[in-house]
Amino acid sequence: MATTLVRNGTVITASDRYDADIYIEKGVITLIGQGLSLPADTVVDAAGKLVMPGGIDVHTHLDMPLGNTTSSDDFESGTIAAAHGGTTTLIDFAVQERGQGLHPALESWMERAEGKAVIDYGFHMIVCELTDQVEIEMDKMVRDEGVTSFKLFMAYPDRLMVDDATIFRALSRTRENGALICMHAENGSVIDTLVAEALRKGQTAPKYHALTRPTHTESEATGRAIALAEMAGVPIYIVHLSCADALEKVRQARDRGLPAYAETCPQYLFLSSEEYERPGFEGARYVMSPPLREKWHQDVLWKGLATNDLQVVATDHCPFCMDEPPQKQAGKDDFSKIPGGAPGIETRLTLVWDGGVRTGRIDPHRFVEIVSANPARMFGLWPKKGTVAVGSDGDLVLWDPERETTLAASSLHMQVDYSPYEGRVVRGSPAVVLSRGEVLVDHGRLLGRKGRGQYVRRQAGLPMVV
Amino acid sequence: MATTLVRNGTVITASDRYDADIYIEKGVITLIGQGLSLPADTVVDAAGKLVMPGGIDVHTHLDMPLGNTTSSDDFESGTIAAAHGGTTTLIDFAVQERGQGLHPALESWMERAEGKAVIDYGFHMIVCELTDQVEIEMDKMVRDEGVTSFKLFMAYPDRLMVDDATIFRALSRTRENGALICMHAENGSVIDTLVAEALRKGQTAPKYHALTRPTHTESEATGRAIALAEMAGVPIYIVHLSCADALEKVRQARDRGLPAYAETCPQYLFLSSEEYERPGFEGARYVMSPPLREKWHQDVLWKGLATNDLQVVATDHCPFCMDEPPQKQAGKDDFSKIPGGAPGIETRLTLVWDGGVRTGRIDPHRFVEIVSANPARMFGLWPKKGTVAVGSDGDLVLWDPERETTLAASSLHMQVDYSPYEGRVVRGSPAVVLSRGEVLVDHGRLLGRKGRGQYVRRQAGLPMVV
Amino acid sequence: MATTLVRNGTVITASDRYDADIYIEKGVITLIGQGLSLPADTVVDAAGKLVMPGGIDVHTHLDMPLGNTTSSDDFESGTIAAAHGGTTTLIDFAVQERGQGLHPALESWMERAEGKAVIDYGFHMIVCELTDQVEIEMDKMVRDEGVTSFKLFMAYPDRLMVDDATIFRALSRTRENGALICMHAENGSVIDTLVAEALRKGQTAPKYHALTRPTHTESEATGRAIALAEMAGVPIYIVHLSCADALEKVRQARDRGLPAYAETCPQYLFLSSEEYERPGFEGARYVMSPPLREKWHQDVLWKGLATNDLQVVATDHCPFCMDEPPQKQAGKDDFSKIPGGAPGIETRLTLVWDGGVRTGRIDPHRFVEIVSANPARMFGLWPKKGTVAVGSDGDLVLWDPERETTLAASSLHMQVDYSPYEGRVVRGSPAVVLSRGEVLVDHGRLLGRKGRGQYVRRQAGLPMVV
Amino acid sequence: MATTLVRNGTVITASDRYDADIYIEKGVITLIGQGLSLPADTVVDAAGKLVMPGGIDVHTHLDMPLGNTTSSDDFESGTIAAAHGGTTTLIDFAVQERGQGLHPALESWMERAEGKAVIDYGFHMIVCELTDQVEIEMDKMVRDEGVTSFKLFMAYPDRLMVDDATIFRALSRTRENGALICMHAENGSVIDTLVAEALRKGQTAPKYHALTRPTHTESEATGRAIALAEMAGVPIYIVHLSCADALEKVRQARDRGLPAYAETCPQYLFLSSEEYERPGFEGARYVMSPPLREKWHQDVLWKGLATNDLQVVATDHCPFCMDEPPQKQAGKDDFSKIPGGAPGIETRLTLVWDGGVRTGRIDPHRFVEIVSANPARMFGLWPKKGTVAVGSDGDLVLWDPERETTLAASSLHMQVDYSPYEGRVVRGSPAVVLSRGEVLVDHGRLLGRKGRGQYVRRQAGLPMVV
């Protein structure tokens, strides 16, 4: 029976802070106390470290096909990078193909992950066609497969977008099966009209990606998604919220007591539309949807995290290389052909700590809440994941709040030839990362083996008002 | 060395829920784990119970002089009643006398409590005259006496009310000494004008107490208090918020990211202005300030508790007898002479559980937060009080969520001849209550001895954004 | 040369009130003064009357085909009824047929009106299919035909509804041609899903018409319409706004300074969803879209008229008989087949005066503004219509503020076998109505001849911020 | 009998625009028509001009004692300057002295104006001490003297400030006498605390005047004033609103349908706190209360004028010389001793036209509304003043929308040695100004004689919702 003892650390959870040792048996925390002197297979010294629940990233796209390419991290490289960054669980997206059901998609993504992942993982299911049969499959996904969340798109008319009737039906279905709908909220009808207009005018550079997706396309869709959820009488979760206008819609709903939730991502907290002004094709690095916004939105999003109008920071990790191989180059002459997405799975915790906790915008408890506890609660992982408590998995990050790092593609572990944060100096990073009691990463050295990560069946039904 | 073992319970904190045993040494939790088999002086079986941090009531008036009478519970009867209700710590108010400093007030209240209290206690200091000397005394109170919060009144012009200049100076002072200002927010100038007008018209019945304190007198003062705090650059805590209009002011401030906090009380969640329509002088039972409001406000307050626009439920326990002795009778012919206040110290937890958790308005974690964790964080008791964690005091309530009680003055322990909730049936109540590891109340039997309660020096500076 | 002298009246315009005589030559006001003693072909005594600009009803459906029936008033009976009620100009809707252009629709509606109308009239154009060709036709309509407003539907998926891309394109087109888009704002996708669900459950009675069109379907669409207009950078006009939720969207937009406008109708100001509880099939009288709402919305709408968040009261006059002929009966067994609409063209002014001016909710100037001046300004009729001023048409209503009437289908002039307001007593009605200086109605006697009404070419571009 | 004919102009009122001639007999408009050919004593050609009602300035301080000096314009120089700028009526403030009643104040100000004023004038009464006797005098002022508005101060603790009880009593009194309370809304308690603190730190330069009066001192007081008016059940009028925060309070009240009104002044629309950074003592030119604000507030105020959240632009004209004589110098070493105020009576119309109408922020009708019609309606001058209509006074300004002027103290007519707008080029100014049919100013030449201005008794009770 494998046992681990983590000694001398300061435990930080969403609500508590105390000095204690933690004893883990068969992957599960069984004892927390002062001065534990128990024999253990592994003893980790956490003196001077903050012992927090491992990060949970509920928005990643590993090994994802897009057009005739694939996001550049697979479940091996992606989860290794995640582990280095202090993330011990992720939820990726399985994508329904039009004309097909949901189970083939789940199987396909299970195969992608199996034997590769070094951390635990689950899947949301992207639904892009909702037949009666698919509605029944949704129930089965929730009940039998532990897939308790579905994602819909209000953008990308010809590929993924579903109409209001479909959204309303899907939302209504969750009233019974207890799943949570995740929404990509951008008005694709308006965007595609603007894109066509721009291309007609010969506006092909990367920056037009941003100019054809104004913030109102996001806020309109956000408001509509919440309204449809309210009419269906169910919660809703807005993914990658990027701007003040959209946040205002969430805030208004929450002020009225509605269960409307939203995540933002580090790119919207740290980067701005100024990046699109870079020379040549460099702006392509930042082509993602929603696009980066004007700088002033950042402060509003941080405030939203502090006031609980935003509950989660996830990454939307979806990397494509600039040159090796030349994935982003597909849109050299037409911004609408640039594969959208950027890397982020490894840098989430360090960025949010540096920009949030060190600046005083949030405290360490709120940090735990937005990068781990809330994602766990909302997506059916809690209390196995997302906290440090007796009975929880021994997924821990021993955080060194003082260690300084300079972010650089060359030293990060993601399989992509650039970093959006190249050269940024951040303070605070994981010293040791454990998954189910096993040391995954020790001061930058990977110890977890490929394939050890397990698929996690998630619970349906939000366990609590967040 | 006294040790206590609490076995087989389900621990509930502000953010966690797990099954575990708890080991307490010298009053402090040292170990939490599965199947602890340690020798202990006292073993308590918590099977089937929820083990939560003891309640903290931050708004009580025990043994308080008012005119030529005194609130009917002293620190003995009051703390015994509190313990029976699951409350293990309270913060009462020491009152500065005009023309005097703060230290005499603190001494006077220390004497009232010493040798009597069965639970731990602290004091806020009511300031009604702010000379330069008193400003200096405030700093000393914070630094040397553990009195880290001060209360000001915007009502009662001739007794307690201070003007905006005084409020602003007091708030500004806390920018340096780290204390928190608690505000009684009612516009006393308007109220006294309305009271004089009513009496001139011969309107002397208890119900005119309510009619001369309309909700806008509270919301105006609430908005002003927050504005003054914003200008001073400090947090503020509104006591006994009673109505939707005032809550809206808090909500708007919080939406803007301001550290504005507010408590409400069970009377505003469960009782309404209909009580003033009772025959004869019976309405006097419900004379308190602010007065009870129209019924629809209750829902808005509950929603405020759920959305975190309200952070605390305290009691404003301040009982006066109707007949034995005839304290309330002082206002038989003039509502303005009725001593204001009602009993509540014993019934807080059971009411909030029954009306909040059992109805689904809040979950058990939020329950812990508003009756224990938040009060502890805001008033400098955390992490000694307000949570169940290694290193915290062994202040625990073993909660029986199913036990049904009928509230009645005759069976409650408060020293007052009526209950505002007489006859109400509630489900959920404390089975066993521990203070620093010692069993205070065991299934309705008092075990804690008079005078065992300790004065708690509190910390200054909010430990976290709430 | 025809001349008319209106003597001794008190003139009321949107902003002025004064005693004066009015001299009209060839239909146009040429002189306003005290004690005018000029020879005139017609002299009308207005002593004791308020002389106001004739009413303008910008939302009517005369002789409108629906399924295999037609609204029961044609341009003769409808305009006669309008004249009796004090309305001297109306704007009806020409409807594009799918697969056809706009010009055939205009011609068809021109024919319907010509030789029949007794008052002046114009047409909005309903667009239900927006090809490139139709976009060009829109410009021609504005430039050459005096059709300067277009209506789109967000409801009725298979008949009239257009998607967001179409709405956005149409709105964008008006940025150049200066037209105004009128929006029927209900989310048809949600509604049709709810309707199908209701029918599946056997819920076929008239009241289910209302229950399947909850207020949020209207507020969502209203918010979306305004968002799309904001993105296109143009004004928008919401027709028949019925509820507080939708009004809130307009209010928020206007607070931000956006040119968002909305009309409500008397039915939403005076009737409520209680009507659907009538026995048998009687509720069918009140089947219209949006449906009648809970009573409390009425106050909010009145307040919106007072605070200028609503700018216009129009009628959506679209009558269908209950029994003779049995038009409404088409939906006897299926509420979704009941032809939607109700009569109102004749009773608008008297209702708004009685419920608005006499109760003090609005003053007589605001009355003029919402029933005449604002419609004229917004729809390109001003300053020919909508005011009493030198150079304006002599369209006048001599209002008797004290005359009491009991509304009854039998005495009203609309060609329909019921009145939604049957038996209601109202005070204030037109004594004499003039159109271009000609007496149309004199104390209930029709003097204007069939066919005298003229088509009015309207101007594009809002003349002023309203 | 004096008659005047104004020919060929384009009349602009709050709601109308038409070409017509205007005939004035004995000072009153009796006829408006096309091509009037009547004999007249005076014929004025208005070809190419906009004929608007004369400006009404409801906030001036002429010949006002302050400390041991007096504002530098008396009723002669001040009204001459007003006339040159197109203003034909003003309302100044009579100031109660503490320990005295209201009538002595009115008499004193009547004397100041009589024999001097060239335009018509009225008085608001400033109340700084409200005894029972003064309450009775308020009624008399309204009923017998035509003084139908009173001003209270929430600032200047030792001179003018009244407490909430006084404000509430005064407001309540207007419920019966129909007067309107005008409020100087700044929290004097906070301001004086900040001023004392600044002086203690040796911060004596003019800019500290602004830094000790932050916007929140204004918005708090504005919100409180409105709340007190709501509780009293009466309208309220906020004078010289200067910032977005305060406007937000007015907006919220108006959204709720409350009769809350506010004026702003040109200085807040055109100047900003940057002026306080001028070298030496020059910032003293801009010392006024409220102080100038950060530039971004200007846009918000303009939007407030467009959306009718602000209803009036007045001047708060209260000039003090910099050097000749050295009035402002009194505060050379202590900003709190600088007499507060700046000149503006002459430049109001041209500035608002240039910055508002020419930029498209407001249209000419709204211009008339905010500089003339609304002031007339609110302060009991309408319909004699504030419009161009039969029966109204012949107070007209013939506006040349194209004429360009460079503002300069040397060419303006105010008796003060600087202009806050020195060097600013504005387009649009009065060509001819008439008061009661008499030409006051003709292309810059003064024709009206000293003392011709009449005291105007004003009506009580707002004539209409604005």
Image: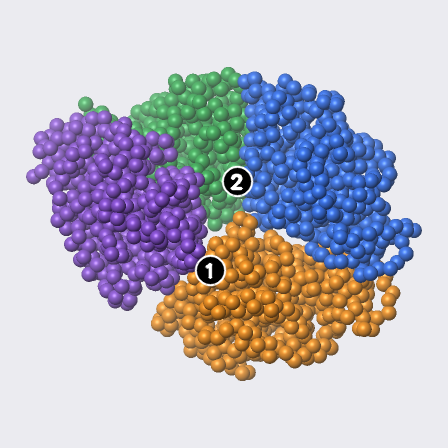
Chain colours: A orange, B blue, C purple, D green
Residue type, mark 1 in image:
Phe
Q: C168 and A463: which one is in front?
A: A463
The residue under label 1 is: A168
| Residue A106 or residue C208, whichever sits in front | C208
Q: CA distance from mark 1 to mark 2?
A: 43 Å
Find residue D82 and report its horizontal and vertical position in percent: 35, 34
Q: Quadrant of residue B55?
A: top right
Q: Residue at x 63, y 55 (%)?
A: A464
The residue sitting at 23% across, 61% down in the picture is: C102
Give the residue at mark 2: D219
Number of disc labels: 2
Q: Is residue A466 left or right of residue D122?
A: right
Badge 1 element: helix
Is residue D246 in sight in this rendering?
A: yes
**Residue C24, label in figure:** none
What's under tag 2, amino acid-wise? Ser
Asked which quadrant contains residue A41, the reply is: bottom right
Image quadrant where residue B251 sits: top right
Q: Position of residue A389 (x, y in %)?
A: 74, 60
Q: What subunit carries mark 2?
A: D
The answer to whether tags 1 and 2 share a subunit is: no
Q: Quadrant of the C terminus of chain C?
A: top left
Quarter that holds the N terminus of chain C = top left
Q: Position of residue A452 (x, y in %)?
A: 69, 77
**Residue depicted at x 33% and y 48%:** C288
Q: Residue B395 placed where, x, y %?
A: 80, 47
Q: Nearer the viewer, mark 1 or mark 2?
A: 1
Q: Nearer the viewer, residue C145 or B136?
A: C145
Examine the rendered structure and indicate whether residue C369 appears above or below residue C401.
below
Question: Which chain does tag 1 point to?
Answer: A
